[in-house]
Amino acid sequence: MLRAFIAAPAFAMLIAAAPAVAADAKLKAAVASPARAAEHKARDQFRHPEQTLTFWGLKPKQTVIEVSPGSGYWTEILAPYAKATGGRYVAGVADLDNPKISEGAKRGRAAFEAKYADQAKWGQITYANFGPQSKPLGAPNSADMVITARNIHNFMYQNALDKLMKDFYDVLKPGGVLAVEEHRADPRPEKANVSDGYVAVSTVVAAAEKAGFKLAAKSEVNANPKDTKDHPFGVWTLPPSRNTAPNGQPANPQFERAKYDAIGESDRMTLRFVKPK
């Protein structure tokens, strides 16, 4: 009888663990997919996609909103993962309702939508207007996770950090996650106007808490101790930008890149905030 009593709970634990194992397998498959761009895969050594998404709490069947997805590094993982697990991936891109939006931003959004239009390959992607004047990202309490990766400094340049943090809070369900990856200024002070792209952890935490979030966890998964954070063209000196001159100026072919390429990508904070239930 004692043997049966021990075995039954053990068997039950195996059954309960099975869905998590399956979900991990689908995430692994999305990260390893040959459909991902080679230049994106090359960045995995610095961005640690599987570990980062696991830390943030990505799960099957979730509605995940990623804002300002750039070239689609996370899109190429999250959209197929949503397709494979019955979830939904929403990309927050250029705000077409903003009458002041630039033609370049419009073209960028159109190019992004065209790049990921193949539903057989990427799944069905939903698009939401996103920006300093944008309307809500979705219905209140409708999303499980909002991801913002390497965007906080841009929100600060736009004087929109508080507004956008509120947008994130409003669209998330109670218990939903705000997932943040950002260039980290610490341990040195954040520069005035975040001129070099590095943000203090305290700045991000204060803005999120002001919106109502609670800091749930920090991870060092995207830390880079080689990053000295004193580069001539700010964080954009490092890969992937690899600037050799100030922003807006022609590249300098004489600039010595070797030591900056050897550093790799920036030292980054990786944070998980939760909207209280």
Image: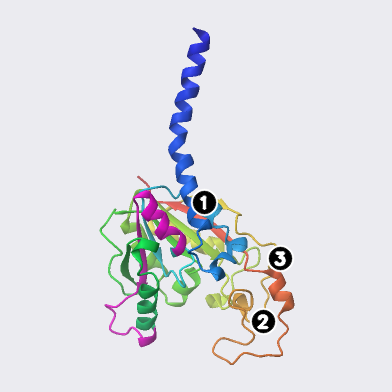
Q: Residue at x 55, y 75 (%)?
A: 194
| Amino acid type assigned to the residue bearing label 1 in the image | Lys
Residue nearer the viewer, 184 or 188: 184
The number of numbered discs placed on residues in the rendered structure image is 3
Pair 2/1: label in front: 1
Alpha carbon distance from label 2 to label 1 = 37 Å
Q: Residue at x 33, y 83 (%)?
A: 101
| Label 1 secondary element | helix
Residue 259 position in % (x across, y down): 74, 75
Mark 3 and mark 1 lie on one chain; the one further toward the N terminus is 1
Residue 124 position in % (x across, y down): 32, 62
Residue 130 position in % (x across, y down): 34, 71
Q: Is residue 42 left or right of residue 138?
A: right
The label shown at residue 103 is none
In the rendered structure, does residue 147 fall within the stretch colored magenta? Answer: no
| Label 2 secondary element | loop
The residue that disc 1 covers is: 28
Q: Is residue 83 left or right of residue 183?
A: left
Magenta range is 76-104
Residue 168 position in % (x across, y down): 36, 60
In the rendered structure, does residue 86 fall within the stretch colored magenta? Answer: yes
Q: Residue at x 55, y 61 (%)?
A: 201
139 vs 23: above or below: below
Mark 1: few, some, or many residues within 10 Å (few <14, many ≥20)? Answer: some
The residue that disc 3 covers is: 226
| Label 3 secondary element | loop
The residue that disc 2 covers is: 232
Residue nearer the viewer, 154 or 144: 144
> Does the rendering let one see residue 224?
yes
Mark 3 and mark 2 lie on one chain; the one further toward the N terminus is 3
Alpha carbon distance from label 3 to label 2 = 16 Å
Pair 3/1: label in front: 1
